[in-house]
Amino acid sequence: MKKIGMGLVGPGFVGAHHVDAVRRLGDVDVVAIAGSSQKSADQKAREYKVDRAYGDFHALIADPDIQVIHNTTPNNLHFPVVMAALAAGKHVISDKPLAPSADEARQMYEAALAAKVGHVVTFNYRGNSLVQQARQMIAKGELGDVSFVHGSYLQDWMTDPNVYSWRSDPAKGGVSSALGDIGSHWCDVAEHVSGLKIDSVLADLTTVIPVRYSSGSSTEAFAAQSTGERTPVKVSSEDLASVLLRFENGTRGSFSVGQVLPGHKNDLELEINGRKLSLKWRGEEQNELWIGHHNKPNCIMAKDPSLVAPEVRPYVHLPGGHQEAWADAFFNLIRDAYTWIRDGAKPEAKPALLPTFADGYRSTRLVAAMLESNAAGGIWTKVQ
């Protein structure tokens, strides 16, 4: 089987995991990476053991040995990188959020449809086997009618004011920080698992740390802070938010996100309550699914290929008791993406797990509604 050529634009924290995932596939060749400069691209190419490095993403896109572009750049570069890749007829796998604005995301989605290529957004928590198990249980009616969808996504990597990331700069990260970065993940997995769509939102946003201290370069996500002289920078984007939800069928919900909450490293939690039973999944305990009952003891379902639904078994790689992790869920999504791409990326052949630019566009509309709600003083705002 001929290998597919992959090129990575933006080799930062998550870029390394894109490279790792495609190498695990075995039928994808990491041809080249492109960085913000030739010097940085050369350095990352040595680190990732990639032969070619480009200081300009246009040169990488033009490389005839590359068929799939992975985009893990800061948010402000998503639009130009993706649009250039689509214009060249390349398949695209992009980090979230798809774009800083819903208008740009809509243009990207429409361009992807017109190009008739594969287009994927890395809402990677869909790739967890027990997330898929919860989705199957709900789809099969085991919960009964869903009455409440709630949870949170809490982190602490920006607790220190000396951590300054491009995510805090509206020119690079967009006007939203926590909601666009991790709130987008929570909403996607909540809608994907429940099968319900958010209709309207009431949001309360705040900035716990309004002044951060920059060393002149962006701190990579989850990395230790750099040392040296610092300049104070005013921050306007939210680092903490709570949102009430109404779904299209009348189901209620709520969630909170924050990146300045000590002790929460990468704490995504989703709970869905039905009339018959409840389900809860936590990203920091991702090999367990809590099942809550009204008239008998609650239980914990462990990740085990012999116990999950038949549709979920392809997403379980190890026997019960052998723990699987964040990188394995990410691999599941990337595997589905390349299966779809190798089959011609026909819309009707898309794996059910796989999030596309349609989901990325929807996510930007959800965040836009939350920002609008907060700006209006916290009122119910319909998702456009």
Image (spheres, rainbow, N blue to C red):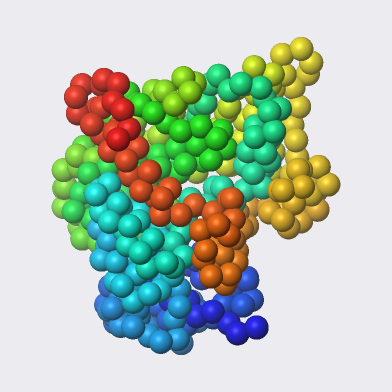
Residue sitting nearer the eye, 13 or 24: 24
Can residue 12 be seen here?
no
Q: Residue furthest right?
A: 306
Q: Residue furthest top?
A: 295
Q: Quadrant of the C terminus?
A: top left
Q: Position of residue 343 (x, y in %)?
A: 58, 70
Residue sitting nearer the eye, 277 or 300: 277
Whether residue 107 sits left or right of residue 358 in the image: it is left
Within the image, what quadrant is residue 2 found in?
A: bottom right
Q: Quadrant of the N terminus?
A: bottom right
Residue drawn at 79 percent across, 15 percent down: 296
- 42 to 303, vertically: above or below: below
- 124 to 201, vertically: above or below: below
Within the image, what quadrant is residue 67 found in?
A: bottom left
Q: Position of residue 60 (x, y in %)?
A: 35, 80
Can residue 127 be seen here?
yes
Whether residue 294 sits left or right of residue 271 in the image: it is right
Q: Position of residue 8 (x, y in %)?
A: 42, 72
Residue drawn at 25 percent across, 66 percent down: 80
Residue drawn at 34 percent across, 72 percent down: 85
Q: Position of residue 162 (x, y in %)?
A: 28, 48
- 287 to 240, vertically: above or below: below
Count of numbered badges drawn on the protein: 0
Residue sitting nearer the eye, 299 or 379: 379
Whether residue 228 sits left or right of residue 147 in the image: it is left
Whether residue 216 sits left or right of residue 201 in the image: it is left
